[in-house]
Image (cartoon, rainbow, N blue to C red):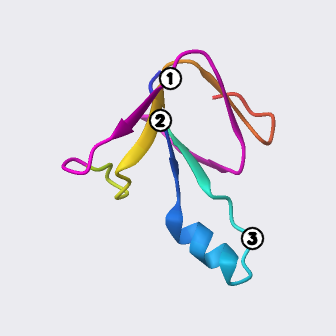
């Protein structure tokens, strides 16, 4: 299953003002996972696509079909 991992800049800005929100999003075709640490167990590709950003607005992300482990020890 394809996973796209990107940084949520809105959460980074909110955290600078005192919030404590997760800043990474792992997107699959069926759900989104929020976390602060991601381990990719296999090949991945870093993508920059300013002409065709993700639906959330991200222009840079990592794509992988490999297993992804989140900081909560949850595998995606």
Query: Which mark identifies residue 62?
Result: 2
Query: Which mark identifies residue 5?
Result: none
Magenta range:
28-52
Give the residue drawn at x 37%, y 57%.
56
Most foreground residue, 8 or 75: 8
Point out the tag, 2 or 1, that comes first from the N-terminus: 1
Please determine whether, in this image, residue 73 is positioned above or below residue 22.
above
Q: Residues within 10 Å of mark 3 (few under 14, many from 20)?
A: few
Please determine whether, in this image, residue 46 is positioned above or below residue 56.
above
Please determine whether, in this image, residue 46 is positioned above or below residue 49.
above
Give the residue drawn at x 38%, y 54%.
58
Q: Residues within 10 Å of mark 2 (few under 14, many from 20)?
A: some
- Disc 2, disc 1: CB below 8 Å? yes
Point out the tag, 1 or 3, that comes first from the N-terminus: 3
**Which residue position is annotated with label 3?**
20
Is 47 covered by the magenta stretch?
A: yes
**Which residue position is annotated with label 1?**
44
How far across and down, in percent of the image, does residue 11 sit?
A: 59, 68
């Amino acid at each position: 299953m394809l996973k796209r991992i990107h940084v949520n800049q809105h959460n980074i800005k909110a955290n600078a003002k005192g919030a404590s929100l997760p800043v990474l999003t792992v997107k699959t075709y069926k759900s989104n996972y929020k976390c602060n640490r991601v381990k990719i167990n296999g090949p991945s590709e870093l993508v920059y696509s300013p002409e065709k950003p993700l639906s959330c607005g991200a222009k840079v992300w990592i794509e992988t079909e490999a297993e992804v482990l989140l900081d909560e020890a949850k595998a995606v």
